[in-house]
Amino acid sequence: MRKTLFILLFGALFFSACADDTVNKNTTPTNSNSRTPSLNENITPVKNTSSFDPNSKSCNPYFPLRPGTSVKYTLQYSSPLVAEVTVVTDAAEENGQKVFIERTQIVDKSGGYEKNELSTRKYICEDGRIKILSEKTENKIQGQASVFEHKFRGVPYLLVDPSALEKKGSTWTVSFTQTISVGDQPPMNPAEPIIINFESQGEEEIKTPAGTFKAWRVARKIKEAEVYDYYVKGLGLVKRASKEGTNWEMKEYAGLQPDPKSVVEK
């Protein structure tokens, strides 16, 4: 149980709750060609609440946070589950400051698992650094609901400023505690904080359905679990890969524009 919850938690913050451990690995998904209607057909797609301003500028081009923009990814788990990810960014005024609200919706597209997840994260930008204020993930798989809420400690910069990011070997950390609610069970509040260690590992050429780009790779690690994020200037996250086999790839975007120097012509 502890291992399962840890992987769920790890996945929630990393935008990829791990279905491998929440769904019985011996379960055979319903045939996607079946005439039986999918529960996910009734899910309302997440949409922007802010209008896009073409004159808006991002304080960190590697994590644009431009209100009114959206991105879609294909998410392939190490299990047979394939999901579609939609990320929309909006903004609001809270306590006298501009807060960026990012909502990430993950929906099962392979059939059978009936996965539906919605994460809401709030950020502010401080001198090019992306500071995360809060995160809440509501997840449902085959009717089993769970909720994860994170309380961040210290100064939680999810991404450093561009000059630091572009320096290979730069490191930083984020620490948080969490509240975990599963079904009707009482909420759990593990006392031990989770610490994520980040490291900028240099520039690589990355091919995705959205294009081929020069991207900066950032490794994030919780104990032995490790994920690699690939950031492109102007677009943000374009690919994510984990050692256990879960992968994200950007397939389309709206309102964002990659830096011409980051685009690889083929």
Image (cartoon, helix red, strand yellow):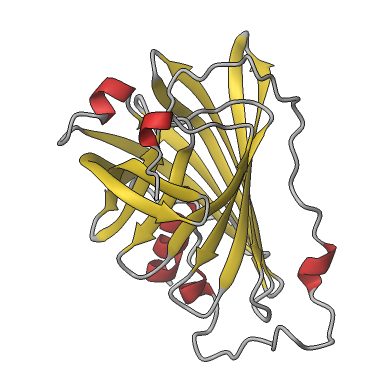
Q: Position of residue 90 (x, y in %)?
A: 67, 29
> In the rendered image, is residue 219 in sight?
no
| x 47%, y 19%: residue | 125
Q: Position of residue 212 (x, y in %)?
A: 41, 49
| x 38%, y 40%: residue | 231
Above or below for 96 versus 25: above
Q: Nearer the viewer, residue 145 or 72?
A: 72
| Lateral position of residue 76 relative to residue 215, left or right | right
| Lateral position of residue 28 relative to residue 38, left or right | left
Q: Position of residue 244 (x, y in %)?
A: 34, 70
| x 41%, y 63%: residue | 7
Q: Position of residue 25 (x, y in %)?
A: 49, 85
| x 32%, y 52%: residue | 228
> In the rendered image, is residue 148 in sight?
yes
Q: Nearer the viewer, residue 181 or 200?
A: 200
In the picture as drawn, the residue positioned furthest to the left comes out as 169
Q: Nearer the viewer, residue 136 or 181?
A: 136
Above or below for 107 versus 70: below
**Quarter holding residue 167:** top left
In the picture as drawn, the residue positioned furthest to the front comes out as 266
